[in-house]
Image (spheres, rainbow, N blue to C red):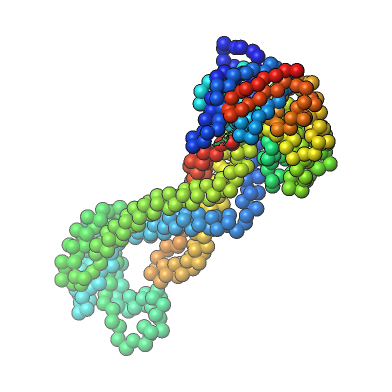
């Protein structure tokens, strides 16, 4: 018996290359473990995918809405409808007046026949319109502001001024609805945030619970590994990698779900936007955001596994 | 190599355990631990292998005061002690080879090294031809030998065996004792808990006897 006064330290020897090889092995073998129970793994992955697809899809929608509203804002134009009984003289005097206004840039006048032709072309109601005995449309003036980046406040002041002219129909366009639209986008953005937060928690819980069951299932094995001197790091590793795989596969499946919905919606949205004479088309996700979703998924997976492992492993001791 | 000083271990809601046990074993010594059922033999071995901790007193193994080890050091210490159990404690869903390899895998040994050492250990217990078998397909004696191969594969300086011959016939028991003798000859310190007094007589080694948790006899022939 060696009576040592100085304490002899127990240390694991360092071996960086071996460490890398072992981690790669565990990375692959934990994927193999998911494959061994395909049904259970698939169900967990689908739950994660749906939980992640909801906020991701909402973000795509909000992004597109924002783009849409920006394309309207950028135009900074208004369509003026003149009163039904406006004479050609009335129209001419209005145009002269508008041209003098320094806030107004380009003007375009459409007489009722031109307006009808335009409507026929874009409304898709050509046949029906052609049946009309009488042209129901008034004179139309398209107004563009001199400053393309005019503030909504100045723009509505300009509109108020124009609407007070006797020739202009007072019900002509307002910015009110655009402000409402903006408010709705903000609301949706906030909602997407909250939803993301809640569903991120759900993903952590789902993965945590899956790993917890897995640990309980393999209690005996863990005891034996501890018995022969397996460290906590060694025991933890396959579970953490399993969480990583759940996160990776779940977020990839979520992106597929979003992509599928996008494909299904793109056609009808583009048709709708054409009907409104808008150049808007449904945008997909930027590559950075795709990576972000996958990265977050992996992170949440490892986090869930970490929580489960820390709750459980200390309690499983050989005896 | 192993030193107990006034070691007591009690379990909640149980009369059993160990009381004030003091003894020491030198490096390379081989001894038997006997006593009636419930005397505390398994408990004593578990204290050495750090599967349990003493309530009072101090346990020293291979220069380490076990009460002072940090949680990080516990697994590293366990690698220095090979343990053999009566109920084998094998992984049912892994082959014999994988079971024996486990102590090497947890220390991160290289592939070739693992293969070489596992084959040597299986050869020693005469199970080289069963390397690919699952433990359930083996007899009790064969499973016991797999457990022995696993305990010695990493060449620990201390080997503990709890009833290693419990369900073996006399001939196989003797074979396994012969194996232990061989390990002892290369310097391994062995402590073997057993009921088999005839076998103990036959081998004429030091014998520690427990009764109701107390060390009542310590005889060296
Ligand atoms: N985990 C435990 N919890 C409570 N009591 C225990 C525990 N382990 C052992 N004991 C008690 O400690 C006493 C000694 O048990 P131990 O297993 O050490 O006996 P043993 O000498 O190995 O007996 P056997 O020869 O039957 O294996 C027994 O009375 C038992 O009831
Ligand atoms: Mg016992």
Q: Nearer the viewer, residue B75 or B207?
A: B207
Place of residue A90 in the rendered image (x, y in percent of width and height, measured from the top left): 19, 73
Q: Residue at x 67, y 19 (%)?
A: B218
Place of residue B20 in the rendered image (x, y in percent of width and height, measured from the top left): 55, 22
Residue B43: quarter of image: top right
The relative height of residue A80 versus residue B201 in the rendered view (above or below) is below
Quadrant, the N terminus of chain B: top right
Residue A238: quarter of image: top right
Q: Nearer the viewer, residue A206 or A102?
A: A206
Residue B198: quarter of image: top right
Q: Is residue A286 visible?
A: no
Q: Residue at x 75, y 18 (%)?
A: B221
Q: Is residue A313 visible?
A: yes
Place of residue B189 in the rendered image (x, y in percent of width and height, measured from the top left): 71, 22
Q: Nearer the viewer, residue B151 or B52?
A: B52
Q: Residue at x 55, y 19 (%)?
A: B6
Place of residue B25 in the rendered image (x, y in percent of width and height, measured from the top left): 67, 18
Q: Residue at x 29, y 75 (%)?
A: A111
Q: Is residue B125 left or right of residue A173?
A: right
Q: Is residue B52 left or right of residue A127?
A: right
């Amino acid at each position: 018996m060696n009576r040592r006064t100085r304490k002899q330290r127990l240390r694991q020897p360092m071996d960086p290359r071996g460490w890398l090889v072992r981690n790669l092995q565990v990375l692959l073998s934990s994927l193999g473990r998911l494959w061994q129970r395909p049904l259970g793994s698939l169900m967990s992955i689908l739950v994660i995918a749906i939980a992640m697809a909801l906020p991701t899809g909402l973000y795509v929608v909000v992004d597109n809405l924002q783009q849409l509203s920006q394309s309207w804002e950028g135009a900074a134009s208004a369509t003026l409808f003149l009163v039904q009984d406006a004479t050609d003289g009335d129209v001419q005097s209005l145009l002269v007046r508008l041209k003098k206004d320094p806030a107004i840039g380009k003007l375009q006048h459409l007489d009722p026949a031109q307006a009808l032709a335009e409507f026929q072309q874009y409304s898709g109601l050509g046949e029906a319109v052609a049946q009309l005995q009488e042209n129901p449309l008034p004179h139309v003036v398209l107004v563009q502001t001199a400053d393309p980046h005019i503030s909504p406040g100045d723009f509505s002041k300009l509109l108020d001024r124009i609407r007070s002219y006797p020739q202009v129909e007072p019900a002509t366009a307002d910015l009110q609805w655009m402000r409402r639209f903006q408010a709705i986008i903000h609301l949706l953005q906030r909602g997407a945030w909250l939803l993301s937060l809640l569903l991120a928690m759900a993903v952590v819980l789902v993965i945590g619970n899956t790993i917890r069951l897995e640990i309980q299932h393999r209690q005996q094995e863990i005891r034996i590994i501890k018995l022969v001197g397996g460290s906590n790091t060694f025991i933890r590793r396959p579970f953490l990698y399993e969480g990583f795989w759940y996160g990776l596969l779940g977020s990839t499946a979520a992106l597929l779900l979003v992509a599928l919905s996008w494909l299904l919606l793109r056609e009808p949205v583009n048709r709708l936007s054409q009907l409104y004479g808008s150049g808007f088309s449904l945008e997909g996700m930027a590559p950075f955001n795709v990576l972000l979703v996958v990265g977050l998924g992996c992170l949440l997976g490892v986090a869930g596994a970490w929580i489960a492992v820390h709750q459980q492993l200390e309690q499983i001791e050989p005896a | 190599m192993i030193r107990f000083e006034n070691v007591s271990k009690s379990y909640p809601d149980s009369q059993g355990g160990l009381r004030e046990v003091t003894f020491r074993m030198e490096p390379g010594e081989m001894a038997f631990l006997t006593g009636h059922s419930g005397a505390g033999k398994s408990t004593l071995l578990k204290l050495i292998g750090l599967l349990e901790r003493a309530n009072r007193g101090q346990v020293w193994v291979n220069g380490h005061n076990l009460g002072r080890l940090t949680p990080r050091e516990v697994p590293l210490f366990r690698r220095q002690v090979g343990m053999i159990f009566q109920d084998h404690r094998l992984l049912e869903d892994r082959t014999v080879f994988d079971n024996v390899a486990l102590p090497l895998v947890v220390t991160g040994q290289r592939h070739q090294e693992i293969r070489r050492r596992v084959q040597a250990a299986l050869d020693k217990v005469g199970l080289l031809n069963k390397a690919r078998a699952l433990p359930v397909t083996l007899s009790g004696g064969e499973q016991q030998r797999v457990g022995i191969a696993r305990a010695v594969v990493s060449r620990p300086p201390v080997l503990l065996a709890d009833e290693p011959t419990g369900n073996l016939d006399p001939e196989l028991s003797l074979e396994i004792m012969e194996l232990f003798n061989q390990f002892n000859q290369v310097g391994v310190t062995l402590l073997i808990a057993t009921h088999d007094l005839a076998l103990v007589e036959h081998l004429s080694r030091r014998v520690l006897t427990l009764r109701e948790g107390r060390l009542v006899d310590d005889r060296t022939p």
